[in-house]
């Protein structure tokens, strides 16, 4: 994910898909757990995802999934 990514440019649906919102919310909860216990550098990114938690689109979920690949290369201390 690039630092200039703007979540405001992603489409937000008028009626959110409940499955996408649930998947996004679950993933954000896991990110919060990871940030608290191992990688606090992701706190700002998690706050950006949480802003769109109740009105997430598949594009928001795709961005959240890219964070998972970033976590593989992070050395937790």
Image (cartoon, rainbow, N blue to C red):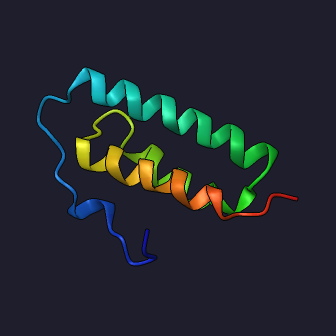
Examine the rendered structure and indicate whether residue 9 appears above or below residue 3: above
Q: Residue furthest left?
A: 14
Which residue: 56% across, 61% down? 70
Q: Which of the two residues, 20 or 56, is positioned nearer the viewer here?
A: 20
Left or right, residue 1 beside residue 33: left
Residue at position x 34%, y 43% from top?
61
Residue 54's x, y, as percent? Answer: 34, 32
Apparent side of residue 21 relative to residue 49 in the rendered image (left or right): left
Residue at position x 44%, y 56% in the image: 66
Q: Position of residue 76 (x, y in %)?
A: 81, 58
Q: Which image quadrant for residue 10?
A: bottom left
Q: Is residue 3 left or right of residue 38?
A: left
Depth check: give the residue in front, 28 or 67. Answer: 67
Locate the N terminus by quadrant: bottom left
At a point 47% along the width and 44% down the height, the residue shown is 50
Q: How many marks?
A: 0
Query: Where is 16 relative to 73, above or below?
Result: above
Percent from the top left, x then y, of residue 12?
18, 45
Name above or below for residue 23 compared with residue 41. Answer: above
Front-lying residue, 41 or 76:
76
**Which residue of the protein is positioned furthest toward the right in this rendering?**
77
Tell me which corner region of the image, top left, top right, bottom left or bottom right, holds residue 23.
Answer: top left
Q: Is residue 26 left or right of residue 31?
A: left
Q: Position of residue 2 (x, y in %)?
A: 42, 75
Quadrant containing the C terminus in the rendered view: bottom right
Q: Quadrant of residue 44?
A: bottom right
Up/down of 25 relative to 72, above or below = above
């Amino acid at each position: 994910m690039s630092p200039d990514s703007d979540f405001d440019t992603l489409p937000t649906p008028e009626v959110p898909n409940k499955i996408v919102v649930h998947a996004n919310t679950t993933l954000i909860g896991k990110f919060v757990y990871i940030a608290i216990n191992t990688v606090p550098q992701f706190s700002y990114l998690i706050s950006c995802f949480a802003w769109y938690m109740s009105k997430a689109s598949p594009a928001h979920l795709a961005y959240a999934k890219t964070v998972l690949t970033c976590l593989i290369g992070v050395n937790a201390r």
